[in-house]
Image (spheres, helix red, strand yellow):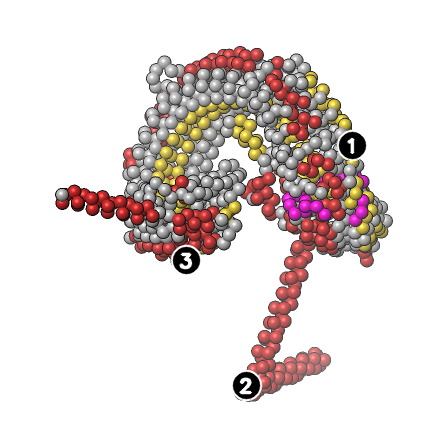
Amino acid sequence: MRKTFCAMLVLVAVLFFGAAEFCSGRNTSFSCIEKEREALLKFKLCFHDPSHMLSSWKGNDCCEWRGVGCDKNNRYVVSLQVRGSIFGNQRPQLYLIANVKEVGSSLLKLRYLEHLDLSNNNFNGNLISPSLGLMKQLRYLNLSDAQFRGRIPGELGNLTRLRVLDLSQSYYGGLKVDDDIQWIARLSSLQRLDMSGVNLSHASSNLFQVLGMLSSLSWLSLSDCSLKNSHLPSHNHLFNVTLLGNVQHFDMSQNSFHGPIPIFLQNMTSLTFLDISSVNLSLTSSNLFQVLGMLPSLSWLNLSSCSLKNHHLPSCNHPINFTLLGNIQYLDLSVNFFQGPIPIFLQNMTSLRVLYLFSNQLSGSIPDSIVQLSKLERMDLSGNQLSSVPDSIGQLSKLESMDLFGNQLSSVPDSIGQLSNIGQLSKLESMDLSRNQLSSVPDSIGQLSKLEGMYLSGNQLRSVPDSIGQLSKLENMDLSRNQLRSIPVSIGQLSKLENMDLSGNQLSSIPDSIRQLSKLEGMDLSGNQFGTGFPKWLQLPKTIKRIDFSNANISGHLPENIGHMMPMLVGLFLENNLMNGSVPKSLCNLKHLAVLALSNNMLSGTIPKSLCNSKSLKYLDLSNNRLSGSIPNCWRNDQSFLFIDLSSNNLSGLFPSTMVELSSLSVLHLNNNSLHRELHVVLKKFTSLMVLDLGENKFSGNLTSIVGGEIHNHSLRVLRLRKNLVSGYIPSELCSLSQMQILDLADNNLTGRIPSCFGKFPIMVNATQLIHDSSDEFWDHTPLMEVRKGIYLVYSWDRAPLMEVVKGRYLEYKRQPLRLEISIDLSSNNLIGSIPEELVFLKDLHNLNLSWNHFLGKIPEKIGQMENLESLDFSKNGLSGRIPNSMSSLTKLSYLNLSYNNLSGPIPTGYQLQTLEDPTMYVGNPQLCGAPLLKKCSNDTLPPTTTNFKDNDEGALKRMWFYIVMLLGFATGFWGVVGTLIFVKNWRYAYFQWVDDVQHWILVVITLKVAQFKKMFNGNQEY
């Protein structure tokens, strides 16, 4: 009875406490802690989440939310992973829109949080919140690439349980530490520390002594931290550094060390991974490998870009190096200055799996001893001057990748494919022999049964063996830029081939067997000579995604059903051919088509309306054809167009009003047609345009419509309205186009004056940012389209050509030159007034053309400040006065036209003007004189000998300082003497006594001399 009663009490207790547990909200079957759920929702409100990474953060149980991890027993949040993702040029997924302190306060409510990952997000350059130092349960903290900026708070040193700390900055680089770094030493449990990209230049000189106090540290990365020699421990301070003996992974690459290899490395005896790449070790003595040989566990070594030379390599006189380096499996000695044969000591490193020696100056043959590296899997010897490959190369049975690109090889040994013995290249997957001097390929190449990538471009091949069809696993084949006239039929047996590049050869046909390539996605046949008899190229597998037949001398019609024949097509390139007929409607209906490039052909007919149905097309180039009619007026804002070029056709009619609905459009070329419309319709809605070229049309209206719309708030860089019917004045609001670098309003009916604010266009004043555009926000506008596996095609705003009048003639700018061109052309209008003095501030302007207007007054006196000016045209105006002497300081000027004005006086001489010897650039100015004109100047009008404008300024400055110093010297000397005589009585008496004595001595000397001369004179008379 008693036992039954006790059992019932136990059961009641269990039920009671279970109910209490349930009511407390900690039951494992239901929801998380309510306070923590509210904290997470508060955290979510701090961010803009365009990619919906936190879209699952709703409902009662936060433990089920993406990135949230809870303890299984008490349901406390112990892990928070909201790591952003970056692919290509895409930006982080979360963008901070609140104060960073709000993020910290919400995280502090997660009292049991152990794992926090906020990496690859955008914290808008905010400081890391010091409140993170209060989260003392943390064991893992990752803030890498989160776009934090400023000082790393020392409060992080309170995280004594932290095992992993990642503050690395791979592309933003805004974090730094100050002189006090003792907080790092308090992280007593730290095992992994990554501060790559953090600015440690201000860290105290005891940096490595502090790091040496982290006894548990095994992984340390200080790459690209601006470290210098002063941060390295000296011989007198190596005590704590010996504690780094537990570190196994150490990366100190891309720093500013120079001189010998850091001596403390020899104490890090546990090292398995060491990266010292991109550090100047040129002053290291010849014992470099002896020091490294003292690291018995080292298996991964990177010494690339270290300015090493032959004397740094171990020689046969130091055999100890060979044995101690025998454990190394990865060795990178690329991008150095090694010369002569491949170093012989490598044959003793028998554990090597990866060997990189590319971009050196190695020559001669690859030695037969290479076969002793029997474990070698990857070998890159590209970018050297090697002349031959030994027959024994076939014995490297484990070799998976061989790169000999850019050498001087003339043949490939037959043994490369001999597989009769087990010791052959049976595992080779990638072989790159591009840019050599190969004239043939051995038949044995067909026996490389596992080859997936074969690259033989830029050689002298005239044929390919039939055995190539035996490469059953080949996926990528590059035979471009050779001398091939035919392709073997056996190519159709390459059942796994995905990408084939045969461009730049002499092919006139391709075998029908190519249609058997069931997995073919990308094919480049550009730069061949297919001619008129080439209709069979359309018979391709339906898997094809990218076709490039540009510059291939192809003629004939595009078949109307081409879209049905290649339904998976993503990119079609047929530029620079002789194609005629119309643009097939079926082509525009392809669901995946992103690139359609048909420029420079003879296509006729109208632009198909089916283009308006495409949601995938991003790049459209139909320029330089014979298309006629109007542009379809059916565009929609859900289309993806980024680039449209319809220039140089016979298009006419109204500009389609619906085209402004293309909100993502970055580049629009409609020049050299007969289109018309009021500008306010054209420009009222474009918000993403970077290039707008409407030149050589019949557009009318005035420029106020530009500043009346939204376009001025964004990124317009090129505005070309040349040769239209634009009228009215140039509004000063045009200066709000802050990214402007090419402004061409020539040959219109503009009136009024040039606004003085034209001297403030930021890029024209300072073009430094153009050089760094590849890493700036500008490239966010660059479309990236994947058109075949592993290959990206980049079409930037400057890919299409742009016609500009420079140096008196039309020049076509393409791609990179256009991106760096900076120009203003206002010629052939009815502009009046004087040339604004403010234009001289545009020191990075390359081309300035104000010809054929009605400008009066003088040429700006300080025009010499426009130091990058290459072309200057002020002709056909009413300018008067003298040519400023400063013009001779325009050292880059190669074209000058000042003809037909009212200029007078001498032509300045000196520097660049003396190289411009064509007198026609001054014709029509009867009052001008001096070379190169035949009219000589009179003496009173001779031009002063001019020097560089900057030199004149510097000379004037030097003269000013000379006079100042001279006056100061005179004043100091004068008052140093006179002041002393006035205020010191004894000195004054002594001075006047000295003067009186000197005077008396002079009088005595003169009297004696006079008496002596008289006596001599009288004596001569008596004689």
Q: Is residue 1011 above or below residue 146?
A: below
> Does residue 718 show up magenta in the picture?
yes
State the residue lying farthest toward the front. Answer: 1
Question: Which label was assigned to residue 984?
Answer: 2
Secondary structure of the residue carrying tag 2 is loop
Of 244 and 730, which appears nearest the observer?
Answer: 730
Q: Give the range drawn in magenta.
A: 708-729
Q: In this view, does 981 lie above or below 319?
A: below
State the residue lying farthest toward the right. Answer: 926
Depth-wise, is mark 2 or mark 3 nearer the camera? 3
> In the image, residue 496 lies at what x, y percent?
48, 19
Quadrant (top left, top right, bottom left, bottom right) of the C terminus: bottom right
Pointer 3: what residue?
179
> In the image, residue 692 lies at what x, y percent?
69, 39
Q: Residue at x 69, y 42 (%)?
A: 685
Of 542 and 466, which appears nearest the observer?
Answer: 542
> In the image, residue 454 lies at what x, y percent?
48, 22
Quadrant (top left, top right, bottom left, bottom right) of the N terminus: top left
N-term mark: 1 or 3: 3
Of 939 and 195, which appears nearest the observer?
Answer: 195
Depth-wise, is mark 2 or mark 1 nearer the camera? 1
Secondary structure of the residue carrying tag 3 is loop
> Which amino acid type is shown beneath numbered disc 3?
Asp
Question: Which label was assigned to residue 653?
Answer: 1
Describe residue 693's horizontal placement relative to residue 291 as left or right. Answer: right
